[in-house]
Amino acid sequence: MTQRRDDILICDRLWSNARLATMVAGVAAYGAVEDGVVAARDGRIVYVGPQTDAPRFEASEMIDCGRRWITPGLIDCHTHLVYGGDRAHEFELRLQGASYEEIARAGGGILSTVKATRAASEAELFASADRRLAALLAEGVTTVEIKSGYGLETQAEVKCLSIARRLGRERPVRVRTTFLGAHAIPSEFKGRSGDYVDLVTGPMLEAVAAGKLADAVDVFCEGIAFSPDETARVFAAAKANGLAVKIHAEQLSNLGGAALAARHGALSADHLEYLDEAGVIAMRDAGTVAVILPGAFYFLRETQKPPIELLRKHAVPIALATDANPGSSPLTSPLLVLNMACTLFRLTPEEALAGLTRHAAHALGLQDEIGTLEAGKACDLAIWDIERPAELAYRIGFNPLHARIWNGQ
């Protein structure tokens, strides 16, 4: 709670002599504030704005930022950090001409990671996920979404989600977890997708909900995964358990998954290379965020780009994420995602940064908590050694992060 004494604002920490990219929409580019100040108390922002308008402060700690830029902490709203093994061999196969779909139908792809994940111990899975998470934090990430989806049986899915929750308890980062039991049809259910959906919507989801292990439920709606009807069954079960829904949709074809998700009030629809205008309009009307994943587009050497102009035309928020996973986006650099979004999809640097802050928060249902620098929100900051915000998307393989602040610490 904000406290004042004789018109003095009492705070724990005060960052001054900074330039702010608040990312608040509808004001200056990047929501920029020159000669800015950020004050925090008990992990919340109590003042953010120009020095000239600031009250007097009584701060336990004062930090001179030396004219560095402060942005909201970055938000990676789509990752698959918990898994066993790797898929470097499949990378070689693709370079020799095999498609992602061909590899998946031959028993590779997601199912090969499922085998490795089931075989790995909890300690091994935690250690490998922790290393990947550390790479994200080193580039300014303060919030991350972690999906399951490489267990595909009740015990293994619970194990992966429990590890994701543990990462949020033991590391200085906000973790949102998503149950993705409907990621692929495991080999033991080959030819019996309906029976597997029964497992997902029954015992699996019941165990996840009982353990409070997930904040949302996701489905991979695609020809090599789950049909729209099967997806709708999972969504209905998720809603019955009080969980939000998300979707992997229109990555390889257009099955109308994004529009289906919008009808169920989905937080986001992700990938979207084959999304059509009807789907865009449905997302707009439902407030569903488009999460664009340039890492997967690049790594799979796709040529069908997401309909960025249609999303702009209909004012659908565009979020970005690493999609960190072993098969289609082994990427743990949000800064590279910024560059890829601009070079591959022609987002502006400001749109790209909004995609990793304001719109990413919206994709997780956390827009009232994080994503912009505003009084009352969590004090999640990234402080950068840059001369202008566009540098974050401009440079490749260069990390200008000076400091990362999570919950005011």
Image: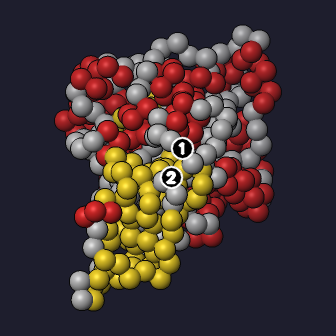
The three-letter code of the residue at mark 1 reads Ile
Q: How is the image coloured?
A: secondary structure
Mark 1 neighbour class, 10 Å CA radius: few under 14, some 14 to 19, many 20 or more: some
Q: Position of residue 301 (x, y in %)?
A: 61, 17
Q: Position of residue 15 (x, y in %)?
A: 45, 66
Comparing 399 with 33, the one in front is 33
Secondary element type, mark 1: loop
Residue tagged by mark 2?
Answer: 68
Asked whether disc 2 touches disc 1, contact meaning CB atoms under 8 Å apart, the reply is yes
Q: Is residue 257 above or below residue 363?
A: above
For residue 5, which numbered disc appears in the image?
A: none
Q: Earlier in the sequence, mark 2 or mark 1?
A: 2
Q: Position of residue 402 (x, y in %)?
A: 60, 55
The three-letter code of the residue at mark 2 reads Arg
Residue tagged by mark 1?
Answer: 386
Q: Quadrant of the N terminus?
A: bottom left
Q: Is residue 392 above or below residue 358?
A: above
Using residue 37 as the reference point, say whether residue 173 is left or right of it: right
Comparing 120 with 8, the one in front is 8
The reply to whether residue 146 is visible in this rendering is no
Q: CA distance from mark 2 to mark 1?
A: 7 Å
**Which residue is rendered at x = 61% and y = 46% of the image?**
400
The reply to whether residue 354 is visible in this rendering is yes
Using residue 256 as the reference point, say whether residue 291 is left or right of it: right
